[in-house]
C-alpha cells in the first residue's frame, strides 16, 4: 500500500501538545482523516483517529461515555467497568478511547509515521517562512 498524499493542518497554539492534524490518502483511493501529530516527552509522534468508548446503562440502555458515574438519560448509577483497549493492555494503561483505524504491522506504522512527520516538518518550515 502506498501513501499517495499527506495533507497537514497545523494547530496555531504553541503551548499545547497537539501540533497538527493529518489527512492521508492511500493508493489514490482511500482516505484517513484526523491523524494527530502530538508533541510528547520523547519527541513528536502520531496518534490514529479514535472515538470515545461507550457503555450501555443497565436500566434504560442509553450509551454513556466510559467511566461515567451516572446515566445521561435516566440518571441511574452506572457500574464501574474497567476500560482497556488492545493497545493499552500491552503497557497496562487504561483508556477511554479506541482507534477507528490503525496500522497492523510495526513496519507500516513506521512508514506512516515517517511520511506524516516529514510532511509536518515541511509544513512547519513553510509556515515559519
Image: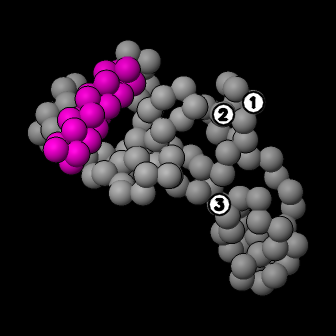
Q: Is residue 78 above or below residue 76?
A: above
Please tell me how crowded label 2 is: few (under 14), some (14-19), or many (20+) other residues with Cα within 10 Å.
some
> Where does residue 65 sit, x and y in percent of width and height?
67, 64
The residues bearing labels 2 and 1 have C-alpha atoms spaced at a distance of: 6 Å
**Depth-wise, is mark 3 or mark 2 nearer the camera?**
2
Is residue 49 left or right of 86 when viewed as pictured? left
- Asked if one can make out residue 32 in the rendered structure from this viewpoint, the answer is no
Q: Is residue 109 magenta?
A: yes
Secondary structure of the residue carrying numbered label 1: loop
Q: Which residue is mark 3?
A: 54
Q: Which residue is mark 1?
A: 92
What residue is shown at x 31% (from left), y 51% (from top)?
Answer: 10
Q: Quadrant of the C terminus?
A: top left
| For the residues bearing labels 3 and 1, Cβ distance under 8 angstroms | no
Is residue 12 left or right of 70 when viewed as pictured? left
Q: Quadrant of the N terminus?
A: top left
**Depth-wise, is mark 3 or mark 1 nearer the camera?**
1
Q: Which residue is mark 2?
A: 88
Mark linked to residue 126:
none
> Where does residue 92 sit, x and y in percent of width and height?
75, 30
Q: Is residue 11 above or below residue 36?
A: below
Please tell me how crowded label 3 is: few (under 14), some (14-19), or many (20+) other residues with Cα within 10 Å.
some
Q: 128 or 3, which is in the foreground? A: 128
Name of the residue lying farthest toward the front: 129
Q: Is residue 69 magenta?
A: no
| For the residues bearing labels 2 and 1, Cβ distance under 8 angstroms | yes
Q: Is residue 64 above or below residue 7?
A: below
Query: Quadrant location of residue 104?
Result: top left
Is residue 6 left or right of 103 when viewed as pictured? left
Q: 127 or 11, which is in the foreground? A: 127
Query: Quadrant location of residue 120?
Result: top left
Secondary structure of the residue carrying numbered label 3: strand
Amino acid at each position: 500500500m502506498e501513501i499517495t498524499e499527506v495533507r497537514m493542518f497545523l494547530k496555531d497554539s504553541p503551548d499545547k501538545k497537539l501540533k497538527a492534524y493529518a489527512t492521508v490518502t492511500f493508493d489514490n483511493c482511500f482516505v484517513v482523516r484526523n491523524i494527530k501529530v502530538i508533541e510528547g516527552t520523547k519527541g513528536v509522534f502520531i496518534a490514529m483517529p479514535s472515538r470515545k468508548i461507550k457503555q450501555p446503562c443497565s436500566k434504560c440502555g442509553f450509551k454513556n461515555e466510559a467511566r461515567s458515574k451516572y446515566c445521561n438519560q435516566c440518571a441511574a448509577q452506572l457500574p464501574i467497568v474497567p476500560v482497556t483497549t488492545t493497545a493499552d493492555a500491552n503497557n497496562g494503561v487504561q483508556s477511554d478511547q479506541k482507534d477507528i483505524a490503525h496500522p497492523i504491522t510495526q513496519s507500516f506504522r513506521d512508514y506512516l509515521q515517517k511520511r506524516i512527520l516529514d510532511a509536518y516538518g515541511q509544513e512547519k518550515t513553510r509556515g515559519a517562512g
